[in-house]
Image (cartoon, rainbow, N blue to C red):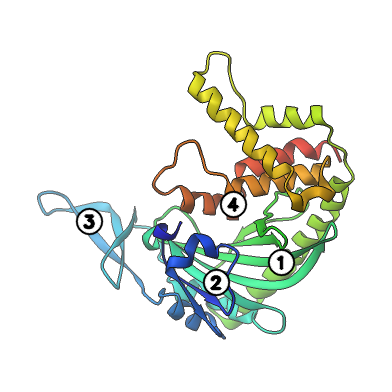
Amino acid sequence: MAHEVETMMSVRLKPWHYEMTKDVTKIIQIAPNSHQALVAAGLDWTVESKPIYDAHGNIIKGFKANTRSSDSKVLGIVSDRYKIVQNVDAFQFTDNLIGGDVRYETAGSLLGGQKVWMLAKMPEKKIAGDDVETFVCFTNSHDGKGSVKAIVTPIRVVCQNTMNIALSRAQRSWSIRHQGNIENKIAEAREVLELTDIYMEELAKQAERWANVTINEDAFQKILNKIFPVKEDDTDRKKNNVQKQKDDFTVCYFAPDLVKFQKSAWGVINAATDYVAHSDPARMTQNYHANNWNRIMEGHPIVDKVVDMLKVAV
């Protein structure tokens, strides 16, 4: 993923995604506020709106280009109603979170600046007896395809897997409103803390239930077949690729760090989070790692599918 991450900073320690981004990661000692975090990560540029011209030099009405001030790179083509949210404005409210056990962890950009993120570390939790680090990832998009969002991002410490799981009783992500006064910024920060706590408490309860649901060999094979379906008329190449996916998932399921959860629904879910983070696809596309990072952070469809299948078991 390093070639897809332009610049990135991390505070004091190597982040869990360091191996994918070490070529562009700058380790710093402190980031007391969002502005300094953005500067350290090389994200202290602005986005400017510029007209688009056709081949004859005429302005194309209804659209404009979002360009980066530092190099005039086009980040996205958007409608003329699109409102730019600068990085400094998108993340400024997070300064109201920082203090005590909450600190900035990383910040960086993906896909040539089209998406920018900032990660804040929250207090650690216990989930099904495991240490789980709690993060909230704030993202800002400049390609016209997304809004400013907050995403709860739990990391199981022993394996460094992202456990962003869809729960029926708690939000894992939500949009951030941009209202400039200090009272609203404080309210937004308070909402982040409250929604994060609700999510982590619900995840802990659900994990305990899943840890006590037995998954026998037959049930595990049925799950594999639903996640990675194959048809009789598929080519041999397709069948071999699907079998490799099943084999890779099975290796994750029997990983040493999951021994205590083997033959349980929680073990299957952990195997799914491990699989989507570390297994390569049958066909590697140019932006695969960056796109997969987005899917993992916002909820990977494979993990969501596994969770949906197992919800009926509790």
Which x, y percent locates residue 299?
A: 62, 49
Task: Identify the element where label 2 is drawn.
Answer: strand
Q: Which residue is mark 2?
A: 106
Measured Cα–Cα span from mark 4 to mark 3:
34 Å
Residue at coordinates 41% horizontally, 55% vertically from top-left? Answer: 144
For this rendering, which residue is in front, 46 or 284?
A: 284
**Local crowd size for mark 2, using a 10 Å CA cut-off: few (<14), some (14–19), many (≥20):** many
Q: Earlier in the sequence, mark 3 or mark 2?
A: 3
Amino acid identity at mark 3: Ile
Residue at mark 1: 133
Q: Which residue is mark 4?
A: 296
Q: Nearer the viewer, mark 4 or mark 3?
A: 4
Disc nearest the viewer among 1 and 3: 1
> Of helix, strand and loop, which one carries label 4?
helix
In the orientation shown, which residue stands out farthest toward the top?
A: 233
Indicate which disc, 4 or 3, sits on the residue closer to the N terminus.
Answer: 3
Residue at horizontal 68%, vertical 41%?
A: 251
Residue at figure coordinates x 83%, y 40% from the top left: 263
- Tell me which numbered mark, 2 or 4, is placed earlier along the sequence: 2
